[in-house]
Amino acid sequence: MANGKSMLFDSTLCLGCRSCQVACKQWNELPAEPDVPINRGTYENPPRLTSNTWIRVTYRETERPDGTLAWHFMRNSCRHCLDAPCRQATKNADSIVVDEQTGAVLHEAGTKNESYAEVRCGCPFDGPRQGSDGQLAKCRMCVDRVHNGELPACVKACPAGALTFGDRDEILQVAEERLAEVKAESPNATILDKNQVRVLILLAEPASMYALGLRD
Ligand code: SF4
Ligand code: SF4
């Protein structure tokens, strides 16, 4: 695996168009959520991750010091931890595995997991969900595509170039270069959890200004 793969979500480029959400549904043949048409006073939809929704874009509107408004978009999904707490929390060792080639953390379909509560609580990013069949389900880093030389579906679909995917060492370098560019205009810019996860997130502002989508 060497250092495996990584993804960078550059929130400064995200348009909030949710092409990534649609692409994930299409590729993984996940059904729509029944409550999507409900207006909750936000552009966010669906309202939470489920066993059929593995990624969603969250929206937060904030006021700049000069009184103008700014949108802050966030990618809410499994971050594919390097030493995954979900894996440490499960009582079923076979149910959560690390993909040899990419390092993706995979909650295996067809393997019963009796410790959903522990797995969900163990995840610092609230990624795992349990379907009505008892199976855990979440982002799989599109390993079926990546093993065949393709980009993850969400990365390929992003029209703004906000998602970048590749070898981890290369993505870490891209992230640092982009951080330096963003910092020139936004001194608070940061990369979240870069030594703990494979899915890196670049923010221009403090994390408190974004909807992280945790424990919803
Ligand atoms: S983000 Fe959560 S579900 Fe994903 S690998 Fe980390 S602990 Fe596991
Ligand atoms: S990597 Fe694949 S499974 Fe994960 S959010 Fe993107 S499209 Fe969905």
Image: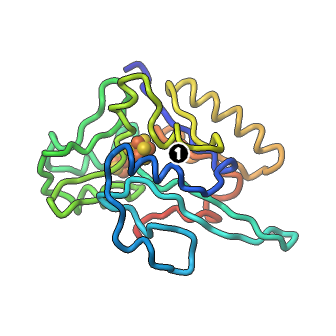
Residue at 36% in and 39% down: 83
Between 21 and 79, the one lying in front of the other is 21
Q: How is the image coloured?
A: rainbow
The image position of residue 23, as x and y in percent, is: 45, 47
Picture layout, residue 156 above or below residue 202? above
Picture layout, residue 157 above or below residue 46? above
Residue at 61% in and 58% down: 73
The image position of residue 45, as x and y in percent, is: 48, 67
Which residue is the extreme one toward the top?
Answer: 2
Callout 1: CB less than 8 Å from ligand 1: no
Residue at 38% in and 61% down: 49
Q: Is residue 208 left or right of residue 54?
A: right
Give the residue at mark 1: 193
The image position of residue 84, as x and y in percent, is: 34, 43
Crowd tier of the residue under label 1, counting other residues whose Cα lies within 10 Å: few below 14, some 14–19, many 20 or above? some
**Callout 1: helix, strand or loop?**
loop
* Residue 100 in sight from this viewpoint: yes
Q: Is residue 193 left or right of residue 178?
A: left
Between 167 and 47, the one lying in front of the other is 47
Three-letter residue code for mark 1: Asp
Residue at 13% in and 45% down: 110
Give the quadrant of the C terminus. Answer: bottom left
Q: Is residue 176 left or right of residue 103?
A: right
